[in-house]
Protein backbone atom coordinates (compact mmCIF):
# COMPACT_ATOMS: atom_id res chain seq x y z
CA UNK A 1 0.00 0.00 0.00
CA UNK A 2 1.36 3.42 -0.99
CA UNK A 3 0.10 6.75 0.34
CA UNK A 4 0.20 9.76 -1.97
CA UNK A 5 0.00 13.47 -1.21
CA UNK A 6 -2.12 15.44 -3.69
CA UNK A 7 -1.74 19.23 -3.63
CA UNK A 8 -3.29 21.97 -5.74
CA UNK A 9 -6.75 20.40 -5.71
CA UNK A 10 -9.65 22.54 -6.91
CA UNK A 11 -11.80 23.49 -3.94
CA UNK A 12 -14.82 21.85 -5.61
CA UNK A 13 -13.25 18.36 -5.46
CA UNK A 14 -14.49 16.07 -2.69
CA UNK A 15 -13.12 12.73 -1.51
CA UNK A 16 -15.36 10.75 -3.88
CA UNK A 17 -14.17 12.70 -6.95
CA UNK A 18 -10.56 12.33 -5.78
CA UNK A 19 -11.01 8.56 -5.56
CA UNK A 20 -12.53 8.48 -9.05
CA UNK A 21 -9.58 10.47 -10.43
CA UNK A 22 -7.05 7.95 -9.09
CA UNK A 23 -9.10 4.78 -9.76
CA UNK A 24 -8.07 4.85 -13.43
CA UNK A 25 -4.53 3.89 -12.32
CA UNK A 26 -5.40 1.01 -9.99
CA UNK A 27 -7.20 0.05 -6.81
CA UNK A 28 -7.72 2.96 -4.43
CA UNK A 29 -7.82 1.95 -0.77
CA UNK A 30 -8.86 5.41 0.44
CA UNK A 31 -9.07 9.01 -0.74
CA UNK A 32 -9.43 11.92 1.64
CA UNK A 33 -9.67 15.64 0.86
CA UNK A 34 -8.58 17.68 3.88
CA UNK A 35 -11.18 20.22 5.00
CA UNK A 36 -11.11 23.10 7.46
CA UNK A 37 -12.78 21.90 10.64
CA UNK A 38 -14.57 25.21 11.21
CA UNK A 39 -15.78 26.11 7.70
CA UNK A 40 -15.90 22.57 6.24
CA UNK A 41 -14.24 24.00 3.09
CA UNK A 42 -11.54 22.08 1.25
CA UNK A 43 -7.98 23.16 2.02
CA UNK A 44 -6.94 22.26 -1.54
CA UNK A 45 -4.99 19.11 -0.72
CA UNK A 46 -5.59 15.50 0.21
CA UNK A 47 -4.23 11.99 0.46
CA UNK A 48 -4.83 8.86 -1.60
CA UNK A 49 -3.82 5.33 -0.61
CA UNK A 50 -3.16 3.08 -3.60
CA UNK A 51 -3.14 -0.73 -3.31
CA UNK A 52 0.26 -1.16 -4.95
CA UNK A 53 3.45 0.75 -5.68
CA UNK A 54 3.22 0.39 -9.48
CA UNK A 55 -0.25 1.97 -9.59
CA UNK A 56 0.95 4.79 -7.35
CA UNK A 57 3.96 5.48 -9.58
CA UNK A 58 1.75 5.51 -12.67
CA UNK A 59 -0.62 7.99 -11.00
CA UNK A 60 2.31 10.25 -10.07
CA UNK A 61 3.72 10.08 -13.60
CA UNK A 62 0.36 10.90 -15.18
CA UNK A 63 -1.11 13.44 -12.75
CA UNK A 64 1.83 15.36 -11.26
CA UNK A 65 1.95 18.74 -12.98
CA UNK A 66 -1.34 18.19 -14.80
CA UNK A 67 -4.18 20.70 -14.69
CA UNK A 68 -7.58 20.07 -13.12
CA UNK A 69 -10.25 22.78 -13.24
CA UNK A 70 -7.56 25.40 -13.81
CA UNK A 71 -5.32 24.33 -10.91
CA UNK A 72 -1.96 22.57 -11.26
CA UNK A 73 -1.84 19.29 -9.35
CA UNK A 74 1.17 18.17 -7.37
CA UNK A 75 1.24 14.43 -6.70
CA UNK A 76 4.00 12.73 -4.71
CA UNK A 77 4.66 9.97 -2.21
CA UNK A 78 3.37 11.21 1.15
CA UNK A 79 5.99 11.87 3.79
CA UNK A 80 5.37 10.39 7.25
CA UNK A 81 3.80 12.88 9.62
CA UNK A 82 6.28 14.21 12.14
CA UNK A 83 5.28 14.19 15.77
CA UNK A 84 4.73 17.80 16.69
CA UNK A 85 4.74 18.96 20.29
CA UNK A 86 1.25 19.91 21.33
CA UNK A 87 0.96 23.66 21.76
CA UNK A 88 -1.47 23.91 24.64
CA UNK A 89 -1.73 27.66 25.14
CA UNK A 90 -4.91 27.36 27.18
CA UNK A 91 -3.08 25.77 30.07
CA UNK A 92 -0.39 28.49 29.92
CA UNK A 93 -2.98 31.24 30.38
CA UNK A 94 -4.33 29.92 33.67
Image (cartoon, rainbow, N blue to C red):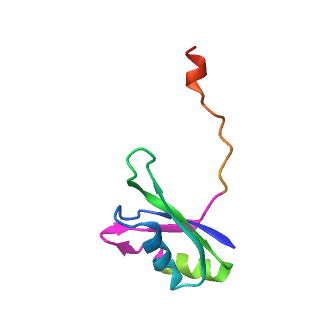
**Image-based side of 79 in relation to 41, left or right:** right
Give the image location of residue 43, x and y in percent: 42, 54
Give the image location of residue 89, x and y in percent: 56, 24
> Residue at coordinates 37% horizontally, 47% vertically from top-left?
39
**Image-based side of 87 in relation to 71, left or right:** right
Looking at this view, name the residue that lies furthest to the top: 94
Q: Is residue 75 covered in magenta?
A: yes
On-image quarter of the N terminus: bottom right
Q: Which residues are magenta?
A: 63-79
Looking at this view, name the residue that lies furthest to the left: 70
The quadrant where residue 12 appears? bottom left
Whether residue 64 appears in this view of the structure is no
**Image-based side of 13 in relation to 24, left or right:** left
Of 53 and 31, nearer the camera is 31
The quadrant where residue 14 appears? bottom left
Residue 66 position (above or below residue 82): below
The quadrant where residue 65 appears? bottom left
Q: Is residue 56 covered in magenta?
A: no
On-image quarter of the C terminus: top right
Whether residue 6 appears in this view of the structure is yes
Of 91 and 73, nearer the camera is 91
Q: How many marks?
A: 0
Give the image location of residue 29, x and y in percent: 62, 74
> Residue at coordinates 47% horizontally, 79% vertically from top-left?
20
> Residue at coordinates 68% horizontally, 44% vertically from top-left?
83
Of 29 and 26, nearer the camera is 29
> Residue at coordinates 55% horizontally, 16% vertically from top-left?
93
Amino acid sequence: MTKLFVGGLPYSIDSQKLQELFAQFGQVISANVIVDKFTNQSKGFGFVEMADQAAAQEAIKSLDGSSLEGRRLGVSIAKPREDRPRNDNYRDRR
